[in-house]
Every structure is written in structure tokens, then in C-alpha cells.
Amino acid sequence: MSNLVMTLSKEEILQIRANFKADRRSLPPGMIFRTKHQGVTISIYKSGKVMFQGANNEEVAEQIVGRKASASKTSSSKTQPSTINYNTYNCIGSDEAGSGDYFGPLTVCACYVSKENIEVLKTLGVDDSKKLTDTKIVELAEQLVTFLPHSLLVLDNPKYNERKALNWSQVKMKAVLHNECIKNVLQKIDTATLDYIVIDQFTPRPTYERYALGDVPLKNKTCYETKGESKSLAIAAASIISRYAFVKHMDALSKSYGTTILKGAGPKVDVAAAKLIAKHGIETVDNITKKDFKNRDKALKILKQKYQ
């Protein structure tokens, strides 16, 4: 399906909402209005972006808005060289979040981006998630999941710690999750149109293929790229969705424990963990953290020094 994204003023958005009957089915997070006109689905997002999905989307957009869609302006950024320009192909990209954070789960996403949707992602502002605020990540992810075929898997802390107790490395966990996400996305698309599978590289190919449970699909189409978010918008989109899942989980933890649960694994996290252990006990904290991180021992040491 062809997609076109426009940034409209509040007045233009209000005009669309006044002129068309709303689709009353439940809307995905981030979407405030949806309707259909002449075979084109029109979706309005909180961000002010409006997506027109359908074969004659440009004509319908011009008819409704009264002007043609202007070319999207995207800031140029330096990217690492790659032998393949992935953004001119149909790609599945995969990435993860939470692997370097003491608190919270490990989240992995694979996402299919057709070459027709590349300009759509640029217009929405999809970029390396490390350059985006959590607020922007939430805004983007809630739009991306409405039209990009994807698979998201979350390995919560108890399951993470169970795998560690079975001598699984984090690399093995990531390989298994990436592989499963990719296989899930392959079930949602016409694989005949797929050009590449691009994995944000966290381990060499032989290690990945050894650790992934079951078959690694389409090895001849699979590439591994360091700093992949800067080379493939499919990886960037997957990164945003996986980061979104991690951020929402962390927000839920903060709400549950009545305090801000910190991201990362620095000294401030050690202190925060020590306070939580003092209040709730080590077993409770182990259930919301990755026990193999050094933060655990450091937090216990802080507590010991406090009560000596």
C-alpha cells in the first residue's frame, strides 16, 4: 500500500475532522482520528502528521488539503560507509534496547520497511534512536506500529535471570530474540519482495548463527551492520519500536514503585538500587533488574557501608 505523510496546521486538521465521518473503531496509541475517502485511509496523529494510505493518495490529499504535498526536508547527517544503500531496497531491520540497562527488560524488534515507505519515514523524522528523546521515540513508535509490519519481543527480568542461571550469555539471548522477531515478520510479508534482512550487529555472523535457536532464515539475504541505525531506516524504525517498549516498561516500573527508575548502569543507578533494596528487599529488586550486572554488588556495598 502506498503511503504519503503531510504535516498540516491545526486549522487544516480541524477541517478534515469536520468534513469526514470518524472511524469509531479503537485507534492505536498516538492516533487521534481515522477515516476513509475514495479508497484512501486518512490517519491523523497527535504530532500533527497526517498519513494518506492508498493507491491514489496524492490526488486525494491534494483534493482534501487544497495543495500538493511538499517534498520532505530532512537534515543531512554523516553516516558510516556501507557497501549497500539499504534505503533503496525492501528491508527487514532488527535492533534491541535495554541491553545496557540494569533495571528493566531486554526488548527486541524486527521491522519491515519497503522502499516506497522510505520517504514516509524521513518525513516522520525517523532517525537513530540514540539521537531522539524518549518523548519523540514514543511519538514516532505509536505512528510506526500502525503501518509497518513488525514483531516485538520482550524478555522480562525474571526470564532474563533464568537464562543467565542456565549460563546463557546476553549475546545468546539477543541472537535468539532477533532471530524469532525476524521469522515472525517474514510470516507477515511477501518474501518474494524482500531484498535484505539487516541486523544491527552485536556479534559476528558465525556467533549469531550458532546461538540462534532453530534455523536462521534467508542467510543469503542477511547482512550485519555496525551502527546500523545510521545505514538503514528499517533498523532505525526497529530501534525506535524496541526503545519505545523499554521506555514504557520503565515508566510502569516507576509508577509501581513510586519513584523514578533510572535507565543505564552508572553510579546514580547504584544509589537508586540501594534505596530500593533498603525499602523493598533484594529479592524484589532482583525481579526488576538484570542480576548479572555489577550494579547489584555495588548497591549492596552502599547499603553495607550505610549501616556499619
Image (spheres, rainbow, N blue to C red):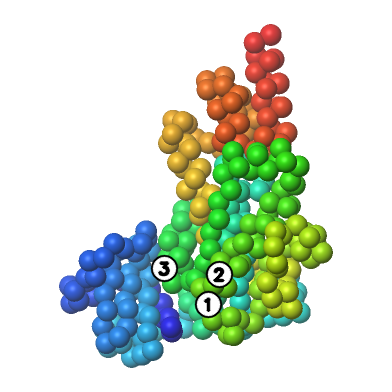
Whether residue 78 appears in this view of the structure is: no
Counting from the top left corner in percent of width and height, residue 277 is at: 58, 23
Q: Quadrant of the C terminus?
A: top right
Q: For mark 1, what is the residue?
A: 189
Identify the residue shown where x is 62% and y is 33%.
Answer: 269
Q: Nearer the viewer, mark 2 or mark 3?
A: 2
Q: Position of residue 52 (x, y in %)?
A: 36, 79
Labels 2 and 3: the sequence-earlier one:
3
Q: Quadrant of residue 24?
A: bottom left
User: 136 or 249, which is in the foreground?
Assistant: 249
Q: CA distance from mark 3 to mark 1?
A: 15 Å
Q: Where is residue 292, by image quadrant?
A: top right
**For residue 185, which numbered disc appears in the image?**
2
Q: Residue at x 66, y 48 (%)?
A: 99
Q: Residues within 10 Å of mark 2 (few under 14, many from 20)?
A: many
**In the rendered image, which residue does mark 3 sit on?**
146
